[in-house]
Amino acid sequence: MAAESRFDAKELRRVLGSFVTGVTVVTTVDAEGRAWGLTANSFSSVSLDPPLVLWSQATRAPSHSAFAAAERFAINILAEDQIELSNRFATSGIDKFSGVEIDAGTGGVPLLRGCSAWLECMVASRLPGGDHVIFVGEVQSIRRSDRRPLVFGSGQYLVADPHDLGKPPPGLGTTVQSQLHAARIGARAMARLSEEFDETMALSVWGNHGPTITAWQPSSRPVSGSLPMGLALRVTSTATGLAMAAHLPTEATRWIVDSELKVNASGANMGPVDEIELNAMLEEVRTQGIAIRAPGRFWGSDRLVNAMSVPVLDASGQTVIALTAIGEADRFPDAHSDLAQALKRTAADLSHRLGYPRASVSAEPLAAVAR
Ligand SMILES: Cc1cc2nc3c(=O)[nH]c(=O)nc-3n(C[C@H](O)[C@H](O)[C@H](O)COP(=O)(O)O)c2cc1C
């Protein structure tokens, strides 16, 4: 009789499922020439010299007797677009190979087309493993394609994307590439911050109409039901605009800034009325690493919102994106809050990953206020 279990079986599955794997279809052929195959994520490398791999199979699987008798098997490492094949080979009692494109490998073992990689193996040993049998195979031949592998974890299919904390992709350097990379890693950082602080966040780039929101991450109570993508913001009176302009050459911003200053001076809009006032505000953003907007109306609504924005700088020290948190004015965290600190740390970290020297972005808790 089995010893009393110290943990719940479902919890054990969940814990094991948190170990993320690739997905393979293990194939073989029996003495009558009949093809067998099953989806398996228990595949693992064992040894390089000699080249050994393993996978394990449930002894109650209908195909177990075929694999137990086989001298060879092939590991087909599935590509990210082969979910249908994975599901098919995980289904008992169907004609799994019908309509599937295969090549005959050594000894007639089927190799599925379109995979990420293949290993053909001779069975080296079969080891008992509880309700499974562990097959150790000596690798006879290998092949791989340029298809990205399918990934499986926590009971669902995943895709393999480079981690945004890893190295940037090779060839980064042109402005466009670094902007795309910054937008990608910025979107992930924004999602993390929004989840941690439950604040609505926006990611902005400098577009042909100035600061432009290209992505939103709503909180559980977003400032508006419609968060407009592609919204162009004022430079001189929004936290995002100031955060961006603080680290852009004057020539890049002048065409917008000049007309905004005139509007501000006429009293038609809030914000600095001349270049001296604006430069003082931009200098403060540069010193503090964050721009804060005093209460203002959210686009197209009467709702009063506050915003804090941090510039993310590229290797040349110019703003490449801005991350902005936006919330109702009456409860929004201030410049000394954990949110403000986290925004600044995130911007410093992202800037560093884009090649900007780390120490140059301030982490002081004060802030510039756009009036
Ligand atoms: C992602 C995934 C991974 C799996 N990994 C294994 C495994 O490593 N070993 C195993 O015995 N079954 C595994 N299975 C279940 C088998 O694929 C499934 O039981 C299949 O029907 C067995 O084939 P058969 O019914 O033809 O014997 C997995 C299923 C999925 C969807």
Image (spheres, grey):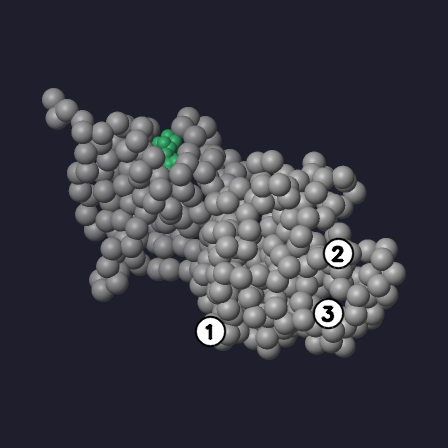
Residues at marks 3 and 2, CA–CA distance in whole angstroms: 19 Å
Q: Residue at x 22, y 38 (%)?
A: 133
Q: Which residue is identified by label 1?
A: 359
Q: Which residue is identified by label 2?
A: 233
Coordinates of residue 314 in the picture (x, y in percent)? 58, 71
Mark 3: give few (<14), some (14-19) or many (20+) Cα within 10 Å: few
Above or below, comparing residue 58 to residue 320 in the picture:
above
271 vs 352, nearest the viewer = 271
- Ligand 1: quadrant of the figure: top left
Residues at marks 1 and 2, CA–CA distance in whole angstroms: 29 Å
**Going by the image, does 47 lie left or right of 298?**
left
Q: Earlier in the sequence, mark 1 or mark 3?
A: 3
Q: Which residue is identified by label 3?
A: 277
Q: For numbered disc 2, what is the local secondary structure?
A: loop
Coordinates of residue 141 in the picture (x, y in percent)? 35, 60
Q: Amino acid at mark 3?
A: Glu
Coordinates of residue 81 in the picture (x, y in percent)? 54, 47
Question: Cβ–Cβ below 8 Å for labels 1 and 2?
Answer: no
272 vs 65, nearest the viewer = 272
**Going by the image, does 328 lie left or right of 135?**
right
Q: Please state, as top left, top right, bottom left or bottom right, where the N terminus lies in the image.
A: top left
Q: Amino acid at mark 2?
A: Leu
Coordinates of residue 40 in the picture (x, y in percent)? 36, 41
